[in-house]
Amino acid sequence: MEKYSSYVSFFRSIVDQDRCAVVICNLEHEIIYMNPAAVRNYEKWGGEKLMGRSLMECHNQKSREKIQQVVDWFMEDDNHNIVYTFHNEKQNKDVYMVALRDEGKLIGYYEKHEYRNTETMKPYDLW
């Protein structure tokens, strides 16, 4: 078990260093984690205070139905693991819902944002 908990730190660090928003929910649609980018991205709606609340409270009825439809699809088959949900033209990003599984069992899902903008950082610019 001790070995497992050290892995959790690695996984959390991966998510926390991502520049894109990552919002993790359990199957009851409760927001159980937001990485720092998500906290900043959703600041005007409460930021960190959204954790523990239902993701469904943040969406209209049509979106709630779509979210539940995707979760139901995730439950149907272990191979159903990622769905493209929309492209935000203004921010030039794609948004996905991704299944979270523990030994094949669906335990939740997360929202992943991927920006399409060309990187402005210079390669290996360490100084």
Image (tube, rainbow, N blue to C red):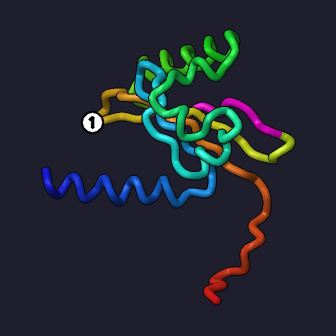
Note whether 107 is above or below 1 in the view shown. above
Identified at 45% across, 29% down, the residue is 52
Instruction: Give x and y (percent) for residue 92.
Output: 81, 47
Note whether 120 is above or below 2 in the view shown. below
- Report the span colored magenta: 81-88
* Residue 36 magenta-highlighted: no
Left of 91 or right of it: where is 38? left
- Mark 1 packing: few (<14 Cα in 10 Å), some, or many (20+)? few
Which of the two residues, 18 or 85, is positioned nearer the viewer here?
A: 18
Residue ranking furthest to the right: 90
Left of 31 or right of it: where is 1? left
Secondary structure state at the residue bearing disc 1? loop
Q: Please state which amino acid type lies under the numbered disc 1.
A: Glu
Looking at the rendered image, the quarter that the C terminus falls into is bottom right
Note whether 5 is above or below 56 in the view shown. below
Identify the residue position indicated by label 1 in the image.
103
Left of 88 or right of it: where is 97? left
Identified at 79% across, 58% down, the residue is 117
Classify residue 103 by image quadrant.
top left
- Dominant SS of magenta comes to strand
Identified at 21% across, 52% down, the residue is 4
Instruction: Give x and y (percent) for residue 27.
Output: 41, 22
